[in-house]
Image (tube, helix red, strand yellow):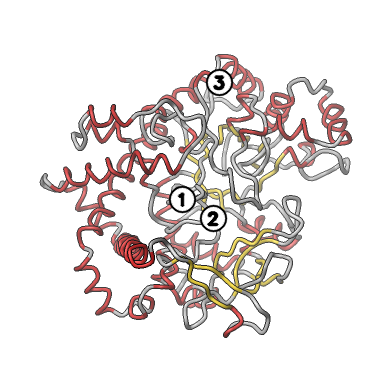
Amino acid sequence: MFQTRKSGILLHLSSFPSPFGIGDFGPEAYSFVQKLLAAKQTLWQILPLCPVDEGGSPYQSTSAFSGEPLYISLEFLAREGLLSAEEVESAKRENFSHTDYQEARKIKNPLLKKAYENFRKVKQTEAYETFLEKNKEWLEDYALFIALKEHFRQKREKEEGGLVPFLYEAKNFLTEEKGTEYFYAACWCTFPKELRQREEKALSEWRETLQEEIKGQYFLQYIFHKQWRALKKYANDHGIQIIGDVPIFVSYDSAEVWANQKAFLLHPLGFPKAVAGVPPDYFSETGQLWGNPLYHWKYQEKTGYAWWVSRIAKALEDVDILRIDHFRGFEAFWEIPFGAEDARVGKWTKGPGMKLFRKLEKELGQLPFIAEDLGIITPEVQKLREKAGLPGMRVLQFAFGGEENHPYLPHSYDKNTVVYTGTHDNNTTLGWYENAAEQEQDHFRRYMNVTGASPHWDLIRLAFSSPAQTAIIPLQDVLGLGENYRMNQPGTTKGNWSFAFQWEQWDEGCVEGLRYLSTLFGRNLD
């Protein structure tokens, strides 16, 4: 995929310093691009841009196509005249030590609503009308979906005095075994029947009833994409490519599942027949029960993989390169019965394989993909990746303490590889080393002939010097931060997705170190 050796930084938008509770597309993002330039980095990897769930995860989103409104910059809205400078200034707090989604919503949502009210008063531009027309395929369903969820949430809260879980007993018609699932009143599975089944008359009536709320969602997506595309262009104009992230699965409670029910393995009443996850592995003894509905791959093939073509086409408008999350799921995926308590009960089921990738390549041209091929990788998965011509991933934190020719040790790489010190699911390198077994630490020190005094820079150097064509470093490792700054801990539901840094942590030594190593190992622009 890459013709020259490159390197870059993994940092999500939410992690920028912010007085609004969450990082966004504002001035701090542009300062970050300047930092990358100074450090001679040419890649910026982010997590999915889609709306996050209540805990901040972008991997359980209400949409695979839309963007998270919290990333919209209030400061740039003021520059457009949609907010006053005084309104934005008065909303500021001290820079948050971590991303706080609840506070960010309290701060930003009222001002985003006010910006929309001001936007309504002016004549709509050609750019806005063009955005609506170009994106109507996904935007109309998404906007109605969000408006309906909010309507029924408010209705249920008013009637019940709070958001009451809706209990569904899985044994009723899916399995002989007992099992339960909880959905909240605002989930689409609790909509009135005519909306669950998307009867055209009901959809039209509700579009009319909720037209102002729907137009508000149009506005948020328009501004989101306008600000993001401006930031991306700024990065691209300075020689920096954006690596995005496409989760293989989508959330059950999402606009895509509601609007494309035949494309997923659902019971006629709308509930999943089975859900996604992974079996027990390095991260969890009971596996990971993600709970996402599985694709109806036979139906997807019958329709020419139209949904996937649309999804990837949209994603490639937003970023330059795509990391395909859980690549092994396209060869075979872990199918877990709906209602199971954890992921130990499951089976491997064949995925679409090369049929999907051939179709994507036919429709979209050469695929700038990175295959996230971590976890249980069989020869069949490796063969699929090689047939698709995609670089795989290697994580250095997994390389030590075992076999001499471990596939994650750099002397085992081929150049069509993307090497990471760690990913968003790993501990920081400093946290990993401090908690590693003595056998791992010893192997680490001997492999690089180091003392272990600065394990994060040792591992960065190893990544940059490796044969891998691409090297990506989480910002936490550049800054030398400990385990309290990790982004996510798989298998847990609290305290994740909240990493934020401050510019004081990024001293000139960080820039110098990256610049020196990039130059030394041929990964710079010159």
Q: Amino acid at mark 2?
A: Pro
* Circles 2 and 3: CB atoms closer than 8 Å: no
Please give the name of the residue rendered at 27% of the width and 77% of the height, measured from the top-left corner.
202
- Give whichever of discs 3 and 1 has the lower sequence position: 1
Local packing at callout 1 (Cα closer than 10 Å; few below 14, some 14-19, many 20+) is: many
Q: Amino acid at mark 1?
A: Val
Local packing at callout 3 (Cα closer than 10 Å; few below 14, some 14-19, many 20+) is: few
User: Quick one: 197 or 469, which is closer to the camera?
Assistant: 197
Residue under pointer 2: 247
- Give whichever of discs 1 and 2 has the lower sequence position: 1
Quadrant of the image occupied by residue 425:
top right
Residue under pointer 3: 505
- Give whichever of discs 2 and 3 has the lower sequence position: 2
Dot 1 falls on a residue whose secondary structure is loop
Q: Amino acid at mark 3?
A: Gln
Location of the N terminus (image quadrant): top right
Find the distance from the CA under tag 3 to the CA under tag 1: 27 Å
User: Quick one: 234 or 187, which is closer to the camera?
Assistant: 187
Visible residue check, residue 138: no
Find the distance from the CA under tag 1 to the CA under tag 2: 13 Å
Disc number placed over residue 52 in the picture, else none: 1
